[in-house]
Image (cartoon, rainbow, N blue to C red):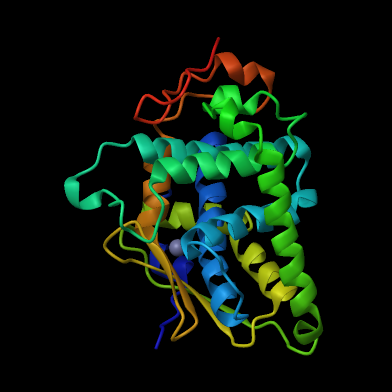
Amino acid sequence: MLALSLLAGTLAAEPPSPPLSPEISRFVVANSEFTLLHEMGHMLIAELDLPVLGREEDAADQLAIMILFLFRDDLPEEEFDAKMLAIVDYWRLESQRPRRAEERVPAWASHALDEQRFYNITCLVYGSDTQRLDWLPRVAGLPMERALYCDQEYQQARKALDWIRHNNRRVAIQRRPRLQIVYDPPPDNRADEQLVTQIRQGGLEELARRVSQVFTPPRTLTLWVTACGSPDAWYNRDEAVLTLCYERLRHFRELAETLPPQRRPGPELECVATSEPPAGGMLKQPEC
Ligand SMILES: [Zn+2]
């Protein structure tokens, strides 16, 4: 069904694009990873027949963040913090982005509003280590009323992930992880090739393989990177195919270009964070 195209072959005649800045590259890779893991969250819920209370979309966000924490020791602490901050930044930017009426998430949708997803994700990241990340609520604009209980939210999510791993372990060791990765020809050759190179070098494929190894779903999973006509991603549970759209990678790059330069996690960020809080006027401004 899916035709595998080797990007190098199709793009050999194109002159190379200038390299992405480290900040933009990190933003694209981090948010591609989050997107991949959110969809793998749906995959795990379906393939492992996990019990879910509450909205599946919220559970998929939590799984994405907690799986990133599962592999946190792969990176130096500062680099891991920068990755998580890039994801927090994405949801802040996404929640503030002006939208056409048809793009807006209605209140009845299965997804939470982007603004709520921003707070939920920020809370989990902060809750992972409230002492070391004590600057995060102020910088991100997470009100103290919510921040106070983020460590409990993180522990709840951690417990759920541990439960999944424990209950799946005995079955999983009898299975062999199977994952195939398919790239369709990108619609905008030079720019898309560069983004694909970034996410591959950034370890997206390796991350997908590791999740397949840790959780070992019963069927072969296909990760399909293709053009969709919109910046989307989804998991098709009938075919066990996870689709990641080239347009989504481009959307990450475009949003990253709106970030202030040289954003870094740490106390110095407090006065670099010129970001506006999400729309709605509920947040306190970062104090610089
Ligand atoms: Zn989803």
Q: Looking at this view, is 137 or 24 the one in front?
A: 137
Image side of residue 220 versus residue 280, left or right: right
Residue 26 seen anywhere in this rendered image of the structure: no
Q: Looking at this view, is 102 or 52 the one in front?
A: 52
Direction top: furthest residue: 288
Location of residue 267 in the rendering, given as x and y in whole percent from the top left corner: 68, 19
Residue at image location 24% in from the left, 42% down from the top: 99
Q: Quadrant of residue 140?
A: top right
Q: Looking at this view, is 134 or 195 the one in front?
A: 134
- Position above or below: 178 against 242: below
Q: Quadrant of residue 126?
A: top right
- Position above or below: 200 against 283: below
- Position above or below: 13 against 114: below
- Ligand 1 picture quarter: bottom left
Residue at image location 66% in from the left, 65% down from the top: 206
In the picture, the quarter occupied by the N terminus is bottom left
Residue 102 seen anywhere in this rendered image of the structure: yes
Total labels: the figure holds 0
- Position above or below: 223 against 112: below
Location of residue 247 in the rendering, given as x and y in whole percent from the top left corner: 34, 56
Residue at image location 31% in from the left, 51% down from the top: 107
Image side of residue 138 versus residue 169, left or right: left
Q: Looking at this view, is 108 or 124 the one in front?
A: 108
In the picture, the quarter occupied by the C terminus is top right
Location of residue 195 in the rendering, given as x and y in whole percent from the top left corner: 46, 52
Location of residue 32 in the rendering, given as x and y in whole percent from the top left corner: 51, 54
